[in-house]
Image: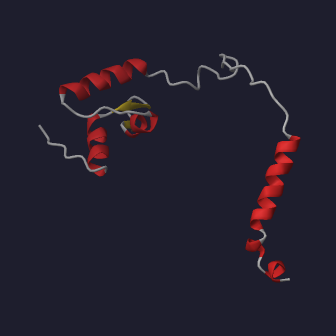
Amino acid sequence: MVAKFLPFLRRPKVLAKKDRDYQEGCVECEPLPPQLLTDQDVGSQWLPDDLEQRIDFLRALAEHSLPMPQNEAQFHAARVFSDETGQSEYNLDQWKDYLQLHGYSVQSG
């Protein structure tokens, strides 16, 4: 009767029953083959087409001995929208601000 009011006392029994039910109902499954994305699955307009801009930006960072972005979020943080060109572009000052915000000491020079 005490176990009725204290459900945590029944927990090992419930877990054992769930484990037994899982083992009895488990069937062998073959792994699915790897799926490859095609241009039809993901349109090329979705993919970043700024490879040349990234290379130029990384070269500029190397010239200034600054850390380089390591993932898409960091590359995104280094971009600003230019009203003159009507598109986003990588910007050293934006990247320096990001680095300082995350605790890096950036010397102007």
In the picture provided, is 29 more to the left or to the right than 87?
A: right
In the picture provided, is 7 more to the left or to the right than 83?
A: right
In the picture provided, is 21 more to the left or to the right than 97?
A: right
In terms of depth relative to the viewer, which is nearer, 6 or 51?
6
Quarter of the image holding residue 24?
Answer: top right
Quarter of the image holding residue 109?
Answer: top left
Q: Position of residue 82 (x, y in %)?
A: 38, 35
In the picture provided, is 57 more to the left or to the right than 107?
A: right
In terms of depth relative to the viewer, which is nearer, 72 or 1?
1
Q: Where is residue 19 in the image (x, y as percent from the top left)?
A: 79, 51
Count of marks placed on residues: 0
Hey, which residue is sitting farthest left in the picture? 109
Q: Which residue is drawn at 72% across and 19% down?
A: 33
Q: Where is residue 70 in the image (x, y as percent from the top left)?
A: 38, 33
Residue 23 vertical placement versus 12 (above, below):
above
Q: Please identify the quadrant where the N terminus is shown.
A: bottom right
Residue 27 vertical placement versus 5 (above, below):
above
Q: Residue at x 26, y 22 (%)?
A: 59
Q: Residue at x 85, y 34 (%)?
A: 27
In terms of depth relative to the viewer, which is nearer, 4 or 70?
4
In terms of depth relative to the viewer, which is nearer, 8 or 80?
8
**Rendered image coloring scheme:** secondary structure
